[in-house]
């Protein structure tokens, strides 16, 4: 008998982390690999935020904090939700955790009983189904298609809901597709959700600031205020402020749920790092102008990437409205043979071929519950992106029809 619980044996490791770690191992072995598998800005954390962290250490803010987070940070979050999202929370309705990731986990942990279903549109972020399994719920994927821009429609939502449904997890802009729900997309879903009062909405807004062109970000609790009493709004500083390693996420929602999430956190991690919390205060309260600069750089890269990916025979993608990924359809390439004679049967085979032959790490779509795609992150330098796309192109043109 092994050590692992039945629960854990059903849970897969994160594909984004696995591909990135494999790239690191190959690099350590002397291979040159460009990592486009991890969703994190390549920019450095802005200096004024780093300085705030240094000042916090020097001022002795190096001890345990309250579980929900230091008061100035929760005040800054209340103000952020008011200023940017037109959402009103009291300070007790805010909690801070080790990244948005932990807050999603705590929310599920605090609320799921056996048999509870958690719905999410797919393609979805790799961690959603696995977190649901870890916290004792049943993940329910609602497939969306490239033809409707990977947006979940009200009829598909209604068809998936039943008396066991507990949460609908929404992520806009989406990882991995970059799809952005407009206010009217959300209104249409809200209409359906009003008929299912047991269902809560988890709005994962981590890519809020990364929307391009005329597209406007919208979030459920603001679009449908009558649903705010059963909506948890999750966000964080990782993507907008280039602070992935600092591990600060936050959530606003109904008091009963926030208190229960604090219990989960208080009995597991206690709280996120005190120094990071002080840095996050400065991030949220300080100068925001660099976010526009990040956004402009991502937007330029997005346009270049979409063009270059579509120029590769057998790969295609639409222009994503947000986040920093292109989700490319590689179905035409499946079934082809590599120069070494192996047949690429799955998107995982294709991703491994790109890693080995092109020296580029991407994530197979199957990790996002979408077979036949690969996710390429464009949160990398323009130089790396240009070299990576040229290498992918060169590797793809070497594929040949497989002889059976
Ligand atoms: N949600 C989505 C959709 C993400 O892509 C990520 C990326 N890591 C997160 C949540 C969590 O971000 P973090 O824990 O760094 O705040
Ligand atoms: N969310 C990012 C990604 O999808 C970071 C890695 C992770 O936490 O999965 O690449």
Image (tube, grey):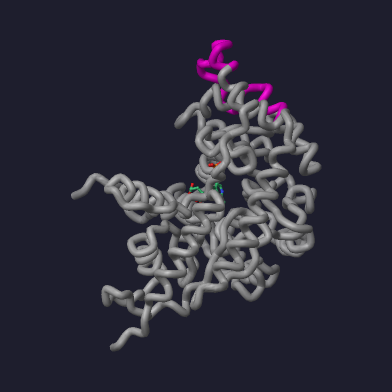
Q: Position of residue 272 (x, y in %)?
A: 52, 29
Query: Where does the magenta region start and end?
Result: 55-76
Task: Please name the residue shown 80% across and 37% down the image.
Answer: 83
Q: Nearer the viewer, residue 281 or 263?
A: 281
Q: Residue furthest top?
A: 59
The residue sitting at 32% across, 75% down in the picture is 338
Q: For residue 395, say whether it is visible.
A: yes
Query: Residue 139 at x, y = what percent?
Result: 49, 59
Query: Nearest the camera: 350 or 93?
Result: 350
Question: Is 94 contained in the magenta span?
Answer: no
Q: Position of residue 24 (x, y in %)?
A: 35, 47
Using the image as rendered, state which of residue 287 and residue 71 is in the foreground.
287
User: Measured along the vertical axis of the image, is residue 223 above or below residue 159?
Assistant: above
Q: What x and y, as percent, mark residue 99?
A: 54, 38
Q: Residue at x 71, y 60 (%)?
A: 181
View extreme (left): residue: 1
41 or 79: nearer the eye?
41
Q: Is residue 59 magenta?
A: yes
Q: Is residue 65 above or below residue 221?
A: above
Q: Residue at x 67, y 55 (%)?
A: 299
Is 346 situated left or right of 384 in this image?
left
């Amino acid at each position: 008998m092994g050590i692992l619980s039945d629960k854990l044996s059903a849970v897969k490791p994160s594909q984004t982390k696995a591909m990135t770690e494999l790239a690191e191992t190959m690099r350590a072995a002397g291979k040159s690999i460009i990592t486009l598998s991890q969703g994190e800005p390549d920019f450095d954390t802005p200096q004024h935020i780093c300085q705030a962290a240094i000042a916090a250490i020097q001022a002795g803010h190096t001890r345990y904090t309250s579980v929900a987070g230091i008061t100035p940070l929760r005040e800054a979050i209340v103000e952020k939700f008011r200023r940017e999202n037109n959402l009103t929370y009291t300070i007790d309705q805010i909690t801070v955790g080790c990244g948005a990731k932990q807050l999603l986990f705590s929310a599920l942990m605090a609320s799921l009983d056996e048999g509870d279903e958690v719905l999410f549109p797919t393609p979805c972020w790799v961690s959603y189904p696995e977190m649901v399994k870890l916290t004792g719920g049943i993940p329910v994927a609602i497939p969306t298609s490239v033809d409707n821009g990977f947006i979940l429609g009200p009829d598909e939502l209604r068809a998936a809901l039943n008396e066991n449904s507990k949460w609908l997890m929404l992520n806009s802009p989406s990882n991995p597709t970059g799809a952005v729900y407009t206010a009217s997309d959300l209104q249409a879903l809200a209409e359906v959700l009003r008929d299912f009062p047991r269902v809560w909405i988890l709005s994962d807004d981590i890519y809020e600031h990364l929307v391009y062109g005329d597209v406007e970000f919208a979030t459920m609790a603001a679009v449908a205020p009558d649903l705010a009493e059963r909506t948890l709004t999750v966000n964080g500083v990782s993507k907008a402020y280039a602070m992935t390693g600092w591990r600060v996420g936050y959530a606003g929602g109904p008091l009963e749920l926030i208190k229960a999430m604090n219990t989960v956190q208080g009995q597991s991690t206690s709280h996120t790092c005190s120094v990071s919390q002080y840095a996050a205060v400065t991030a949220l309260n300080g100068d925001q102008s660099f976010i526009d600069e990040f956004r402009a750089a991502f937007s330029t890269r997005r346009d270049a990437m979409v063009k270059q990916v579509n120029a590769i025979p057998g790969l295609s993608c639409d222009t994503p409205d947000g986040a920093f990924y292109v989700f490319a359809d590689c179905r035409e390439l499946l079934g082809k043979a590599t120069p070494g004679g192996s047949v690429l049967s799955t998107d995982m085979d294709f991703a491994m071929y790109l890693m080995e032959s092109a020296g580029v790490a991407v994530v197979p779509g199957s990790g996002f519950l979408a077979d036949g795609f690969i996710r390429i992150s464009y949160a990398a330098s323009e130089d790396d992106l240009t070299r990576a796309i040229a290498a992918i192109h060169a590797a793809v043109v070497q594929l040949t029809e497989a002889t059976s």
